[in-house]
Amino acid sequence: MNLILTKERLSEQVYRMRVRTPLIAAERQPGQFVILQLDTEFGERIPLTIVDSDVDEGSITLIFQVVGRTTHQLAGMEAGEKIANLVGPLGQPSEIHNFGRVVCVGGGIGVAPLYSIAKALRQAGNELVVVIGARSKELVILEHEMRALAGELIICTDDGSMGRKDLVTAPLKELCEAAPKPDRVVAIGPPIMMKACVETTRPFGVPTVVSLNTIMIDGTGMCGGCRVTVGGQTRFVCVDGPEFDGHQVDFEQMMARLGSYRAQERIAAEGCNLHDEALRKGLKE
């Protein structure tokens, strides 16, 4: 079980995998995630959103970015290998109804979890506008998949190499200023991007949902690592989320907590880079 069926590189540091796990595939709903562990004895546990599933095949699709030791190790695995531990589906499913006109905003790797939600919203009869943001053309993912779902697709890049040279908040503000304004906004990406989207929609009173990716360990709410403040109350992303009313989220507190282990994360990443460099040197010799 947990057999990797396919692996595909979407950009320099982003990969897509299909993994055979029939029970999770059968139960998974949009917005939910899994927690995986590669080393059952000492390996860290990391959350990854389920991007899609195929019940007939018994598989789920995961998209991840190489940012630390575990994602680095996962990127080195190939089809035919098995993931030791895969737990899910976890978290509350997305709220899917026919809201009317929905704007889905994805930044960087946030486009991956956004896809499953956008797909479900389209199937529910919503009119979709999708905004994708990335630093450059090479880092834009799921363009064709999103284009197939959206009535309008807007791409923004920091360097102008694709679409508009703008932040995602620029077209989002334009859409909120237009008549009729959106009935709902879903924003997923780096915390600073989600906060900016929330502040963009707040003056217009447009309901805005964000999906939070905090530090997680057990996925059951017991460890408290994923706690955030929403509407002045403590909530746990793994069991109460991952989606919340963006206008109620204390982003400053969340971003401060995300930086708690930055030094350890940097050391782990440097170790992976040194390992890669040694491997390349060995191959050359």
Image (cartoon, rainbow, N blue to C red):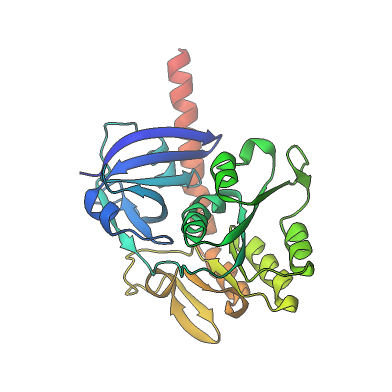
The residue lying furthest to the front in this view is 125
Q: Residue at x 57, y 47 (%)?
A: 146
Q: Is residue 180 toward the left or the right of residue 261 in the image?
A: right
Q: Position of residue 60 (x, y in %)?
A: 34, 47
Say which of 205 and 38 sits in front: 205
Q: Is residue 93 left or right of residue 11?
A: left
Relative to 236, is 7 above or below? above
Which residue is located at x 31 percent, y 70 percent?
220
166 and 143: which one is in front?
A: 143
Counting labels gives 0
Q: Residue furthest bottom?
A: 232
Q: Position of residue 276 (x, y in %)?
A: 47, 30
Which residue is situated farthest in the left direction here? 1
Please identify the quadrant where the C terminus is shown. Answer: top left
Q: Is residue 245 above or below residue 130?
A: below
Identify the residue at image location x=51%, y=46%.
67
Q: Is residue 248 left or right of residue 180?
A: left
Left or right of residue 13: residue 131: right
Residue 104's x, y, as percent?
Answer: 60, 59
Q: Position of residue 216 (x, y in %)?
A: 40, 64
Query: What residue do we see at 72% from left, 70% from top?
Result: 181
Quarter of the image with the N terminus in it: top left
